[in-house]
Amino acid sequence: MPSNASDEEIEALASLEADYEPDHKPRASKRKPWMPDLNPTQKRVFNDANPFILCYGEKGSGKSIGAEHKLVRHCYENWDALGLIITPSIRTGKFGVIHDLETLILPAWEDGLALEWLPSKLDPNTKDRVLKMANVHGGWSTILQIAIPYAEAIPSRIKGIHPSFVLADELTDCEGRDYFTLVAAQLNRRRHINGPQQYVATCNPKGPSNWVYQLFIEEPLDKDTGKRDENFSVYHVPFRENAHRPEMANYLDTLERAIKGDPIERARLVEGKWIERPTGDALFKANYSPERHVIGSLRDGTGITPVPWAPCTIGYDLGQVYSAAVFMQLVPLEDNAVWVVFDEICHLNEKILYRNMAKEIVGRILDWNRHLGKKMSWEHITDDSAVNQWRPGGGGSFDAWEFENEFNRAGLIHGIPQMKMVGCPKGAGSIEARVRMTQNRLHQDTLLVSAQCPLTQEMLLMLEGKKDEPLKPKKTARGMIHVFDAMSYPMLKYELGGSSALGNAPVSVIHSA
């Protein structure tokens, strides 16, 4: 319906619902304990009473199916409930959500509780669909699906509709937060609803700049306290929880073939990552290839393990809001040496006390020592400004000195040797040198990354150079420059002869716990 639709056209929706009012009372449903077949994350979503819920994930993860079961539950448990389904296109509704409801979701409820429901009817003018289903109170509830392809059409399309539940499908394909603010504002106006009235959205992830990411993930987080607004729930619904279903047997292989050669789409649709599409200024675009440089599978829990005969290195870039630690090892092969990134701990755009960061790293060191069956030798490398420059504010301190104290305090009770941060030169030209060095290693395939290090992978895909200084990384709110610094400090330190990070054993691949 166009945004300038008349009241008569808008009211046709109410007429359609009236025309579709069943001429009989629904048959009584079975009064017995019953639950639909849900995966673990779907079950958490099903029972979540928070007003605003986002379910995102890779293709085929079952995020929409879980949300649709929640919609049916609401309509079943409440008298005269109105469940509103918002889709970005008519096709998405007819062949997506409505198809799921009529061929999978409602038949399951019919089998489980003898729930009566009537197939959807189409308004030929608005292309809206209305579906009736019985509720536990002996009456009918309504599910209404409407398509809103443009944000400008939202006010007219939802005029006069007072839903008690909203399911927004494929929300990242909708152009702007009016799809949330204007639609969610219609909730809590319907009478006789006892349960929570909720806005539940499903989507495949896109980039962190997408409004859905900002609204549900970024903005509810208080960066000063680290606490989230408890009204907003966010669930990553992983494919692995849905992979056991027979219809999923060949799905992932087909999807992998379809998006082969597009690492961004693969990261989004296969791994469920929120990742931007790099511009032409991406520093490592011409050199980095996930097919060549990433070892293992995030889905299968495989990746790189360090060899037990060589020292490990942790590169740091520490700060008050952005802190990154990248776990690395330099392993010699027959004709060269290869850097491997096997772990990472990164807190980007969030405040974390050095005490807590140090405890995390100590814990990870203990995990790797246990996995390898020995106390490994660990080197700790950061930039020399963190070692040599006084940071004012908060009483003033050297970042490295402050972190060392926290690390040594946390490690003392576990028998971890006292650490001493080593500084890597960060003078004129050092940034460009680290960029060129990374480009060369990628070109020569002498820098490999574990599949269990998603932020390092994202950095190699996304880090952009400045327009006027193309070999200098651009600072962004996402903070990928800090991951780059943490990874590249140890490599430059070794090139300058200041690191003992050389081992004598081949790289191996492990199944991570």
Image (cartoon, helix red, strand yellow):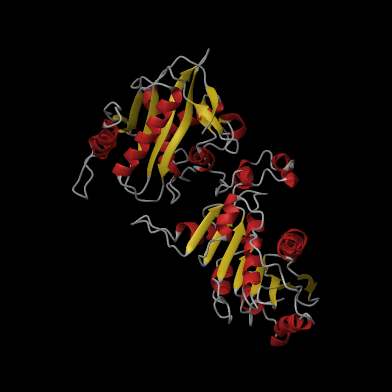
Looking at the rendered image, the quarter that the N terminus falls into is: bottom right
Q: Residue 133 in the image: x percent, y percent?
A: 72, 72
Against 296, is 30 above or below? below
Figure disc tally: 0
Q: Residue 481 in the image: x percent, y percent?
A: 43, 42
Q: Is residue 206 visible?
A: no
Against 243, is 429 above or below? above
Q: Residue 40 in the image: x percent, y percent?
A: 58, 50
Left of 416 or right of it: where is 4?
Answer: right
Which residue is painted at 55% across and 66% down in the image? 177
Q: Is residue 395 visible?
A: yes
Residue at the extreme left: 395
Q: Residue 334 in the image: x percent, y percent?
A: 53, 12
Left of 325 or right of it: where is 158?
Answer: right
Against 331, is 47 above or below? below
Residue at the extreme top: 334
Q: Nearer the viewer, residue 209 or 98?
A: 98
Residue 160, image quadrant:
bottom right
Which residue is painted at 79% across and 78% down in the image? 125
Against 337, is 370 above or below? below
